[in-house]
Amino acid sequence: MSRPYLFLLAGAAAAQALEPRQTFNQSIPPTTTLNDSGSVIENPTAFATPFVLNVEDMWDLLVGSVTSAATTTTVSATPVPASSLIPPPPLYYSPFPTGQQYPMELKNESWSFSRSFLWGVASAAFQIEGAVRDDGRGPSVWDVLGHRVTNYEVNNYTADVVDNNYYLYKEDLARIAALGVKAYSFSLSWSRIMPFGRGPVNQVAIDHYNDVINTCLEYDIIPLVTLYHWDTPLVLQDTYGGWLSEDIVNDFVAYASVAFAAFGDRVTYWFTVNEPIVFCQQYPLPAHYFKNFTIPAEHQQFYCGQSVLLAHSQAYHLGKSMMPNSIIAYKNNGGYKIPLTNSTEDAQAVQRAWDFNEGWFSDPVYLTGDYPASVKNYTASFLRPLTQQEMQSINGSADIYAHDAYTSQFYFAPDGGIDACLANSSNPLYPTCANTSYTYSAADGGWLIGPAADPGASWLHKATDWVPQFLNYIADTWAGGRPIVVSEFGFAEPFEADKTLLQDILYDPLRMSYYHDYTRAMLIALSEGVNLIGCLAWSFVDNFEWASGFSIRFGMQYVNFSDPALPRYYKASFFEYKSAFDIYQEQ
């Protein structure tokens, strides 16, 4: 599908795009030029020219050539060999040779997952689909970041092919079904469904996602659909700044309407946006690759955040009107925040960390309709206040509390104290004014909070013993009786991308330990009364980890990225994850 789209290129971009170039009279000052009648016009950088570009033009002019996979048609699923479903020891022992002994865990009879507990796996369109230029998909911001911004991605990797899930989704769903997975969380590509982010709808994309959803249902897998997982359509970024502008609200709601109408008869669980804390902090985007905007860099994430809250709340209310029985929320993210010491200042630092992370979006949606006081105090000088009507729309715009809860860490007051930090906007910790650590205090031995993940995921440690407290905090602070879903959790096995021996890759002991201990931590939280209804492991397959590319691996299945059509292989961690529900889920 290749529809034209009207671009306005301004300033330097217009000068580069126009041929022949405007010739300037050197006797005229460089800040002026002549119009057709010979009169002087100030500031020629304000000139703009209309450009009509179709989808293919956009790829050629704004992104460049892309790599195609060897497989470019949808592949039917093949039976998963029985030999691939044998878990590793000590979960399983072969009948020969005999003699192995292991102190097996005894089942805690006071623990259980309910029969309806929604355990599953997760992914995101840009990270697994590939086929970036196929079937009318328009480019996203991340296509530019990978193709044009040198070293933005580790080793200049791109997501052109990745897992080629766009053509191999039937095989992928068959493989997760073979392990009895109950739920699959995935995102739609906005620029695949609407190549320009607005305007024409690509029916080929609608047909594709219809078949993904139908295939899930054929395997008795419950689909959970995310509308937006970071892949902003490029046209919207270059037209008005993407999430920096409230113009995106109407475009997002129009896109949501298309998705709800197309898939809402079969999809009950919806997430509007994934981790706004992260994608808003991606702003400002690298200069000279996107249309320039004048919002100060340090303020951009908060303009983004306000647009997200407005877009999410309007999409929520639209979804509830179109699909009354749907369950709609957004996905928050972060880690449990632990005071490093029992000092008053460290406790204040912890609260400020909550406010500028989860609270930034959770307080408006689940508590007040407005920002936490510390966030509002900071943004009041540049961000317009939300209206009473907007706050009423935002407040309560979620049916569950969904959190991507990977890890935990310590927080403490900055050197010199919080007040001194707040008085100094050049302090690198400003405006949150809370410092972080993954080690206990020196008085407590200075030990790590838990084993470190791959160095490329320096933010991640196996801190599973804090998960019950984390889930209790969410329940007590924001959920307000709503069900809670751990919508992502997972672990990057250290140095896995450097391994070359397949059997070495498939045996991932730290990730196994992470899933074992995390599932038991959720059982503890359930036994304490937390209304936890599901968990979604990240990720069901090795994928493209954004700016880290393929340099770190979160997958519970191995993929040969040189040829994704080659067989996938289950890692030991997938069997460990499944084992928790074999043991503890009520039948």
Image (cartoon, rainbow, N blue to C red):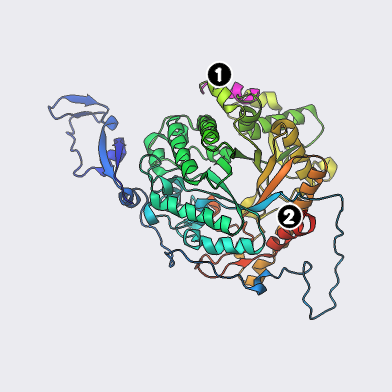
Eye-nearest disc, 1 or 2: 1
- The magenta-colored residue range is 373-383
Disc 1: which residue: 388
The residue where tag 2 is placed is 514
Asked if residue 103 can be seen in this view, the reply is yes
- Examine the image and state in which quarter residue 378 appears: top right
Q: How many marks?
A: 2
Question: Would you say the magenta stretch is mainly helix, strand or loop?
Answer: helix
| Three-letter amino acid code of the residue under disc 1 | Gln
61 to the left or right of 79:
left
Residue 347 horizontal/vertical position (percent): 76, 30
What is the crowding at mark 1: few (fewer than 14 residues within 10 Å), some, or many (at least 20)? few
Instruction: Indicate which disc, 1 or 2, sits on the residue closer to the N terminus.
Output: 1
**Residue 495, percent across and down?**
64, 61
Coordinates of residue 314 in the picture (x, y in percent):
51, 31
Q: Which amino acid type is marked by label 2? A: Tyr
Name which residue lies at 37% across and 52% down: 136
